[in-house]
């Protein structure tokens, strides 16, 4: 008796009406632009190079363009005072460096 009930319930769940009821509602993205209008993001890697040439820290982040990545590099050089420069890479290409602006002691 129990097996028959399980089989009947399984057949019921397989019905199209039940599948429609259980399907989650479509996702609403609100003000997101359509996919074809979105700016493609590029992944940048920021290497903090210290005076001895070592790289004790790095950061990886997506940005729309090189200018946004350059702003992030300046933020990082301000946060990490031991860095001599920040090397910025897009994939396997070195894009630019941001040197630390040290004021020489008079």
Image: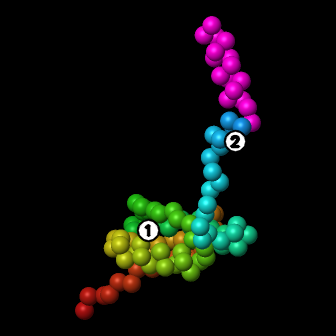
| Residue displayed at 39% across by 68% down | 50
Q: Is residue 17 left or right of residue 105?
A: right
Which one is nearer the viewer's eye here, 94 or 78? 78
Is residue 21 among the parts visible in the rendering? yes
Look at the image and give the residue range highlighted in magenta. 1-16
Q: Which residue is mark 1?
A: 49
Q: Is residue 52 left or right of residue 21?
A: left
The reply to whether callout 1 and callout 2 are in contact (CB within 8 Å) is no
Which labelled disc corresponds to residue 17? none
Mark 1: give few (<14), some (14-19) or many (20+) Cα within 10 Å: many
**Camera-nearest residue between 60 and 27:** 27
Whole-percent x, y for residue 28 in the image = 61, 60
Q: Secondary structure at mark 2?
A: helix
In which quarter of the view is residue 56 placed? bottom left
Q: Nearer the viewer, residue 46 or 100?
A: 46
Name the image quarter holding residue 31: bottom right
Q: Relative to 83, is 86 on the left or the right?
A: right
């Amino acid at each position: 008796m129990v097996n028959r009930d399980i089989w009947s319930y399984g057949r019921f769940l397989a019905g199209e009406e039940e599948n429609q009821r259980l399907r989650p509602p479509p996702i609403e993205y609100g003000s997101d632009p359509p996919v074809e209008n979105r700016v493609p993001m590029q992944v940048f890697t920021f290497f903090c190079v210290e005076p001895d040439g070592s790289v004790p820290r790095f950061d990886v982040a997506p940005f729309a363009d090189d200018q946004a990545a350059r702003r992030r590099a300046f933020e990082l050089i301000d946060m990490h005072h031991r860095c001599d420069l920040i090397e910025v890479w897009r994939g396997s290409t070195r894009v630019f460096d941001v040197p630390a602006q040290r004021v020489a002691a008079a």
